[in-house]
Amino acid sequence: MSEVTITDDASSDSKRRTSREVVSKLTAPNASRRKSSFFKLAQSSQQGIHIRRMTKALLGQNLETPDEQQDSKSKVRLENTFKMKPDENFLPFKIRNEISLVLQEHLDNVTYDPMVCARLCCELSVAIKNKVKSLNTPRHKVICNVCISQHTEHGIQFASRCLWDASTDSHACVTYKNNSLVAVGLVHGIFFE
């Protein structure tokens, strides 16, 4: 067994202890319980966030994003309704009209450029999602995907898979084409119990 020498400057004697004695004194009463590395990671990330927020507070910067500020002002806690079916179903034909209007409005005179289209995908996705939410589809989560590709003689396949209840959930898909690009807008409406 290996030994560890511990010297104490306060006393003149040096004491020799086995490594087991040192470890048993250094560990807490719950020595048999071992904490996972995930616990340490979560704890260190929480400390990092706290330090970052304190630094921003000392510098006088705003700590919250505009979405967090809006959420903190208008948080309303609702009671559970225990409804298993929606009052109104997700209506794909109404949503298809809104998707096609947004795509025509934004992509009418646009030529395909990969850098521009990457940014347009995000903007169109947000615009379509806001339009669908304005239709007041109550108790449905709205998920929107937009894909833009170059209009060539090649084929493209756009697939989406979901696990849902067919009686309450649905989707709407619209394809828009012009001379240089093809855009596909896909919106899923999932009932939120």
Image: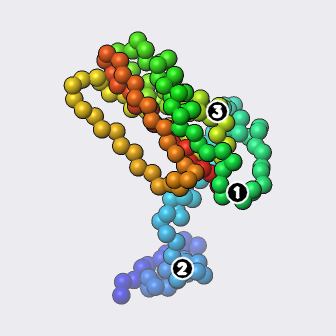
How far, Cα to Cα, is label 2 from label 3?
54 Å
Q: What residue type is labelled 1?
A: Lys
- Give the SS element for disc 1: loop
Task: Identify the residue at image location x=77%, y=50%.
Answer: 78
Q: Name the residue under label 3.
A: 135
Task: Identify the residue at image location x=43%, y=78%.
Answer: 5
Q: Nearer the viewer, residue 56 or 92?
A: 92
- In the image, is 41 to the left or to the right of 52? left
The mark found on residue 33 in the picture is: 2
Tell whether label 1 touches label 3 (CB within 8 Å): no
Graded by Cα atoms within 10 Å as few (under 14), some (14 to 19) or many (20 or more), the crowding at tag 2 reads few
- The mark that comes first in sequence, 1 or 2, is 2
The mark found on residue 35 in the picture is: none
Tell whether label 3 touches label 2 (CB within 8 Å): no
Q: Where is residue 158 in the image (x, y as percent from the top left)?
A: 34, 39
Q: In this view, does 123 lie above or below 187?
A: above
Q: Position of residue 149 (x, y in %)?
A: 32, 27
Q: Name the residue under label 1.
A: 83
Q: What residue type is labelled 3?
A: Leu
- The mark that comes first in sequence, 2 or 3, is 2
